[in-house]
Image (cartoon, rainbow, N blue to C red):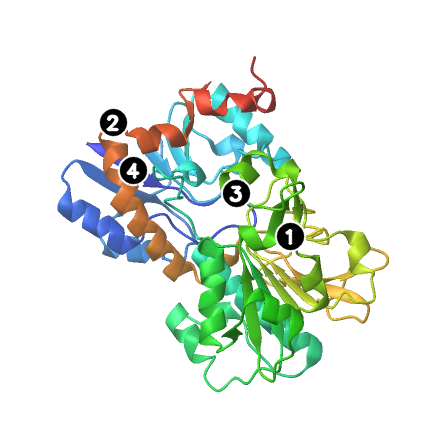
Amino acid sequence: MITIGLLREGKIPADNRVALTPAHCKWIHKTSTEVRVIAQASPERCYSDKEYLAAGVEVREDMTGCDILLGIKEVPAKTLLPGKTYLFFSHTKKQQPDNRQMFRAILEKKITLIDYECLEHDDGQRILGFGFFAGVVGAHNGIMAYGQRTGEYNLGRVHQQQSFRELIHTYFGLRLPEIKVAVTGSGRVAHGVLEVMNLLEIVEVEPDEFLERSFSYPVFTQLKGGGLYEHVQTKTYHREHFHAHPQDYRCTFLPFTRTADILMNGIYWDKNMPRLFEWEDMVHPDFRIKTIADITDDKEGSIPCNLGEASMEAPIYGVDRQTRQRTAPYLPGSVDVMAVGNLPNELPRDASRYFGQQLIKYVLEPLINGGSKIIDRATMVRGGQLMEHYRYLSEYAGVR
């Protein structure tokens, strides 16, 4: 018998998503006599303890009897149980300083860590993630913020709706002005953004049209890798080469800062990649962007004026273009920034249902049956030892 424990989220502010919904747990119990799921008591989850109990899931405080522990966000170092197998988003593969203590505790306590972010198909496509719903909520918030700034329309908050289906109903009859929206990226986040663009009947146009024409209706353009970066010498773009040698490329986004009203940023970024624009560009008189939804949310990353996370309760802040200081939103001379790390929390049930379905479909069976190539590639630490793919984290982890 394998016992899977659903952890109560310990990171503050608490996340309300779950790895497995009550319905998922009920299905697992029905289809397997070798697996039992228990849930740690939690007042924060989008599914209550009562809902888990009604699905036949035991709810308890003590997780020491579990073999595998599933969370969502980082687990506080002090609550990590020695010798266990954990799956959650550790946010350590980029050597994030805030999670260094937790990562070292994982090694010290001889824990096995399988990171959701590292679970990939053979072609490198990620298996698990909340990116689509981050894109939906981020796009909604970006459009909402522009309406708040201009006063031309009013859009409510996502979390006021019970589901994505209910959210769609709030778009009926909404008339948007002649805005121009630039969307960056091509992954799950961008797909979520495009879903909202289509639901709001914002018309897609080609990048050259976006730059050269005016429109009497709202439009957007999508900029993927080849439309954002070019090799400094050859003026070409090859995805694999770019990710291996990003320092050899420059960003070609700058002309869009002069024509877009709203930027929806959904690109992957690391410290070696060129930014979409720089601080110096923001003070230019032609810089037109008023609202930036930085959905991938890298502080001072591809968006230099991302000065850190806002909260789900207050997702928008302003940044003064001259002083580079954080301000209240919607002020003259400022750019409004939406940067929230847990956007899917505004649609937690929808996001959790999708996540759990993918977890069951691709991960659960090999996980309980001894592993697979997919599981092995995503195992950052096994029994307190860094795995080969993650040896580059040795200094970060404090090991030799």
136 is higher (above) or lower (below) than 40 = below
Mark 1 or 3: in front is 3
- Which type of secondary structure does the marked residue at label 2 adopt? loop
Residue 62: in sight, yes or no? no
Kindly report the distance in space between the C-alpha atoms of the residues bearing marks 4 and 3: 42 Å
Residue 50: in sight, yes or no? yes
Pointer 1 residue: 309
- Which type of secondary structure does the marked residue at label 3 adopt? loop
Q: Earlier in the sequence, mark 1 or mark 3?
A: 3
Pointer 2 residue: 370
Is 35 left, or right, of 17 in this rendering? left
Kindly report the distance in space between the C-alpha atoms of the residues bearing marks 4 and 1: 32 Å
55 is higher (above) or lower (below) than 176 = above
Pointer 4 residue: 4
Q: Earlier in the sequence, mark 4 or mark 3?
A: 4
Picture disc at residue 238: 3
| Residue closest to the eye, 271 or 251 | 251
Q: Amino acid at mark 2?
A: Gly
Q: Amino acid at mark 3?
A: His
